[in-house]
Each structure stands twice: as C-alpha cells, then as structure tokens.
Image (cartoon, rainbow, N blue to C red):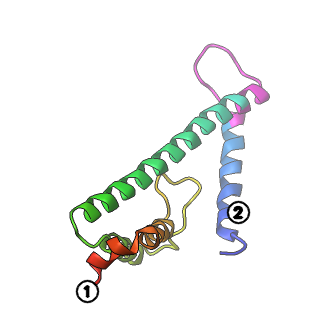
Amino acid sequence: VINRHSQKQVVKEKLFSFLLSALFYEDNDGYVENFGESIGELLLKTAKTFGKLKFSRANEYEADETGWDLLVQSRIDPRHLETFFSKLLKLQGDDGFTRWDSTHPGTLERISNLKNKWTDLPKSRRKQFLY
C-alpha cells in the first residue's frame, strides 16, 4: 500500500492504452489529426471523465451526509451507517481505498468520515444514542 505498486501498474497500462488510442485515433470528422492533435482530443475527453468522477464522489459524500442527518433526526443511532460500510468492506474483498478511476469514494474513507462525524457530534446529542 505504501508504495502503491498496483496503482503504478494500472497507470502504466492506462498510459500504454492511451498512446495506442492516440496512434489510431479517429473521430470521424473528416479530418486526419496528427499525433499531437489526437493526444489533445483524448486528453480533453479524459479530463471530462475525471471531472465527472469527482462529481460522482461528491454525490456519494452528500448521500452519506444526508443518510447520517436523517438517522440523527429520526433518533436512530447514526453509527449504524458506519457498521453498514464496515460490513460492505468485508464483502468487497479489496483494500477499501479510493481508486483514482472510481465513481465512488473508497469504503475506508467513508467509514473514516462517519467516525469523524460521530466525534464532531455534540456530546449532548451523542448521549441519546449511548445505551
């Protein structure tokens, strides 16, 4: 995990695929792009995709926040959300970290955010959920 060997391997594979795509790029606009133009167009499309990924992750964080808030407002212990993600992590069978090409935040990151929300919840509010 520290050296991110698997992540480096994925980046190398994606880079090779990207270069091959640029070599044989065709967008059917009737104009034959040179290599630089092909790379430029592909980078633009890739940038749009990465922008969408970040937006998708933001939506997931917002959903987590909304779920947390609804549980608190309903006087249901919001730590059940953390329990759900912990069970999900076991079922996923991966390391739980956010992948750079993922539309969702990593499960470990979501669990960490929920733990922080519990810590940030005023003690007077937390007391109602302690058994």
Q: Which residue is mark 1?
A: 131
Amino acid type assigned to the residue bearing label 2 in the image:
Lys
Please provide percent x and percent y for residue 7: 65, 64
Q: Which residue is mark 2?
A: 8
Q: Is residue 32 above or below residue 15?
A: above
As helix, strand or loop, the secondary structure at mark 2 comes to helix
Residue 126, quarter of the rendered image: bottom left
Residue at 44 percent across and 55 percent down: it is 61
**Disc nearest the viewer among 2 and 1:** 1
Please provide percent x and percent y for residue 115: 45, 73
As helix, strand or loop, the secondary structure at mark 1 comes to loop
Residue at 70 percent across and 63 percent down: it is 8
The quadrant of the rendering that contains the N terminus is bottom right
Please provide percent x and percent y for residue 107: 46, 67
Q: Is residue 93 above or below residue 15?
A: below
Residue at 62 percent across and 38 percent down: it is 47
In the image, which residues are magenta? 22-39
| Residue placed furthest toward the top | 30
Amino acid type assigned to the residue bearing label 1 in the image:
Tyr
Please provide percent x and percent y for residue 33: 72, 22
Marks 2 and 1, how far apart at CA: 46 Å
